[in-house]
Image (cartoon, rainbow, N blue to C red):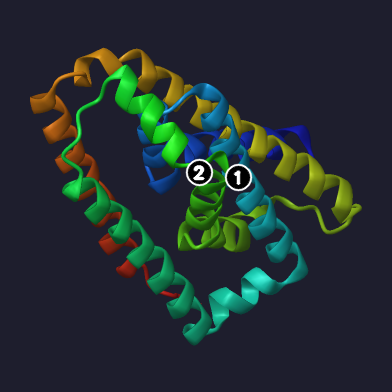
Amino acid sequence: MSIDTFLIYSVIAFFYVLSPGPAVMLAIVNGIRTDMKTVAVSCFANILGLAVLSTASILGLGVLILTSATLFLIVKIIGAFYLMYLGVKFLRNKGILNIDAMEKNVKQKSKKAYFFESFFVAVTNPKPIIFFTAIFPQFLNLHEAIAPQFFIMTGEFLCFSFFGLCTYAFLSKKSKALLSNEKRMYWFNKFTGGLFIFLGLGLLRIKNHA
């Protein structure tokens, strides 16, 4: 792979990671509601899910999902309804954001729960499946060893994702004081819930063009 090709891939991967989506929204919400250690666990789960999708694409499983209308539909529906489920949970949440409540919520929801929540969002999202299946392979030089290219490109993408999501969470945590009263938290929950539902509906609109 030439340096020019790698730089082009890097730019595409960087902006893909930073673009709004379920993982970014979840990182922002977790940044507000819990501590950075738990956020790191959640972000690690996300990149682990992305690593699974990347590996699946190189093994041909991603192509199978993308070309099989039935499998694509199943993955799409599961991901969409899970996002809408998260949205409904936020819409029904009437709590306010304060230190005591945050500590209570962290105890009620373990790091393991945050881990699997983030991992599930990652592996059921058709968007990264399309990225790793339709875009990622285009930057591989088939005349050179595939494995080194795969690990370098995937490693860079996962680093972008991990630090990008952590940054989103950190910035949201810094603005946490703006949401420390009942009225602001009410609208935060409504906005967040509505956005998750909107993202879920958006996934249902994604079509399989294979």
Which label lies toward us, 2 or 1?
Answer: 2
Name the disc covering residue 45, or none. 1
Q: Label 1, secondary structure: give it.
A: helix
Q: CA distance from mark 2 to mark 1?
A: 8 Å
Residue 165, position in %: x, y? 50, 32
Q: Residue at x 46, y 34 (%)?
A: 107
Residue found at x 70% / y 65%: 56
Where 146 sits versus 39, above or below?
Answer: below
> As rendered, which of 169 and 51 lies closer to the eye?
169
Q: Position of residue 141 (x, y in %)?
A: 80, 53
The image's mark for residue 88 is: none
Quadrant assignment for the N terminus: top right
The answer to which of marks 2 and 1 sits earlier in the sequence is: 1
47 vs 58, nearest the viewer: 47
Q: Is residue 1 visible?
A: no
What is the number of callouts on the image? 2
Q: Is residue 162 above or below residue 64?
A: above
Query: Decide: marks 2, 1 in contact (CB < 8 A)?
Result: yes
Please identify the quarter of the rendering in which residue 88 is found: bottom left
- Asked which secondary structure carries label 2, the reply is helix
- Which residue is tagged 2? 114
Residue 85 picture location, percent across and down: 30, 60
